[in-house]
Amino acid sequence: MFDYRILSSVPPSIRRTCLLAVTGCALTLAAAPAHADDYDATLKDIQSTMGGVPSFVKQFPKAGLPGAWAEVKAIELSDKTALPPKIKSLISLAVAAQIPCSYCIWSDTQDAKRAGATDEEIQEAVTMAALTRHWSTIFNGMQVDFDTFKKEMGGQ
C-alpha cells in the first residue's frame, strides 16, 4: 500500500515487514517459469525498492517471485492506479481482518496510517468487513431468495 514518495522516509525494517504482507497476498501468480536472470533482477528490484530483501522472500518459489513482485508493484505499490494508497490499504486491512492474517493486519494498519488514515477510518473499514460478513451469513443461512432481494433493493 506504499506510495513511492513515502518509501524513502520509511525505515528499512518497516519496509521489509510490509513486504511480507504484500508478497504473501500475491500467491496467485502466472504459471510461466522464470529464468535465473529474472529471479536475480527481481531480488535487485526488491532491494532497491524496499531497502532490503526479507528472508521470507527467498522462501518463495523462484519461478513465481518475478510475477508476484510485478503484481505487487503494479497494483499495491503504484500510485498510478484507480485507488489511492490509503483506500487500498483500508480494503486490504478489512479483508485481512476477515481471513484473518495477523501479518497483513499489522502491515496494512501501518500502511494505512502512513497514507493518512485516521484511527476512526481504520476502525470503520474493519467494521464494514464485519458487517458484510454478518449480513452475508444471514442472507445465505436463511436462504433469502436472490431475485426477490435484488427487486426489493432497487434492482431490475
Image (cartoon, grey):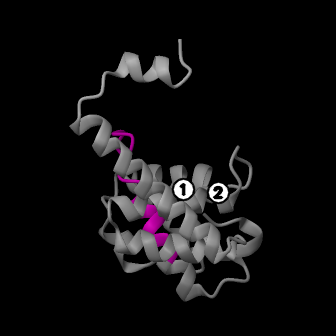
Asked whether the beta carbons under mark 2 and mark 1 sit within 8 Å of each other, the answer is: yes
Q: CA separation, marks 2 and 1?
A: 6 Å
- Residue 39 in view, yes or no: yes
Q: Say above or below: 118 vs 3.
A: below
Callout 1: helix, strand or loop?
helix
User: Where in the figure is residue 151, as x and y percent of width and height?
Assistant: 48, 17
Residue displayed at 77% across by 70% down: 5
Q: Find disc 2 in the rendering and name its residue.
A: 87
Is residue 2 shown left or right of residue 40?
Answer: right
User: Where in the figure is residue 134, as x and y percent of width and height?
Assistant: 35, 51
User: Where in the figure is residue 50, as x and y percent of width and height?
Assistant: 59, 74
User: What amino acid type is highlighted by mark number 1?
Assistant: Ile
Give, as a single range, the part of the protein colored magenta: 18-34
Q: Say above or below: 151 vs 117.
A: above
Residue displayed at 43% across by 62% down: 23
| Number of marks drawn | 2
User: Where in the figure is residue 111, as x and y percent of width and height?
Assistant: 60, 72
Give the residue furthest to the top.
156
Residue displayed at 34% across by 68% down: 101
Choose between 125 and 46: the one closer to the eye. 125
Q: Find disc 1 in the rendering and name its residue.
A: 91
Choose between 154 and 88: the one closer to the eye. 154
